[in-house]
Image (cartoon, rainbow, N blue to C red):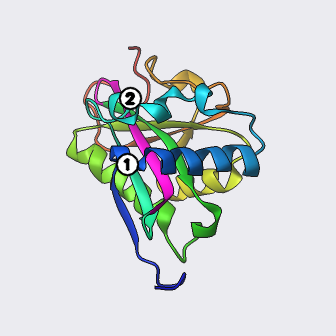
Amino acid sequence: MNEITTEIQVNRFVQADEQGVIDVILSIQREEFGIPIAIEDQPDLQSIPEFYQVGRGDFWVAKAEDKVIGTIGLKDIGAGQAALRKMFVAAAYRGRAFGVASRLLDRLVAGAEERGVTDIFLGTTDKFLAAHRFYEKSRFVEIKASDLPATFPMMVVDTKFYALQLARSSTHGWSEDG
């Protein structure tokens, strides 16, 4: 297989994926975006099954030739709601030609629907302009921080927030008081 026809698979995280997940995420955070962050600052990456794969949550990886090239996590935050976390795609695999980001997001949304999640929230930074466009094209709507549920796991770097409503709740919309 050459790089044009490389098969990309999206599968549920297994423990053997841990180092690949750490490598792809840290390299993007540090090298591409200059965020001074270490693995010690992200304990969730060393305990993915306990942090993400509980309740209605899960974690998926995209792989090409057995190498992790993308990640996405769904964190159960209660009340049928979840947070999208750790969505990263290696630079060489970005764009429509590979469709890795779309495939990861599609898998997360399908997984959320299967688990009865009604709303997905995410936080990102002002720096990730391409991510903003991607989320907006994927039906996420920008919301204010004050519209996030009290259980949303706010990150220090988060400055921009989005929500995707999967199923309308009969009692509330975007904001949940807890």
44 on left or right of 134: left
Mark 2 highlights which residue?
51
Residue 172 magenta-drawn?
Answer: no
Front position in the image: 161 or 98: 98
List x then y, in percent, for residue 162: 53, 39
What kind of element bears circle 1?
helix
8 on left or right of 168: right
Q: Is residue 161 above or below residue 150?
A: below
163 on left or right of 167: right
Mark 1 highlights which residue?
16
Other residues around mark 1 within 10 Å, as few (<14) / some (14–19) / many (≥20): few
Whether residue 124 appears in this view of the structure is yes
List x then y, in percent, for residue 26: 63, 44
Q: Residue at x 63, y 68 (%)?
A: 92
Q: Residue at x 68, y 39 (%)?
A: 125
Quarter of the figure that contains the C terminus = top left
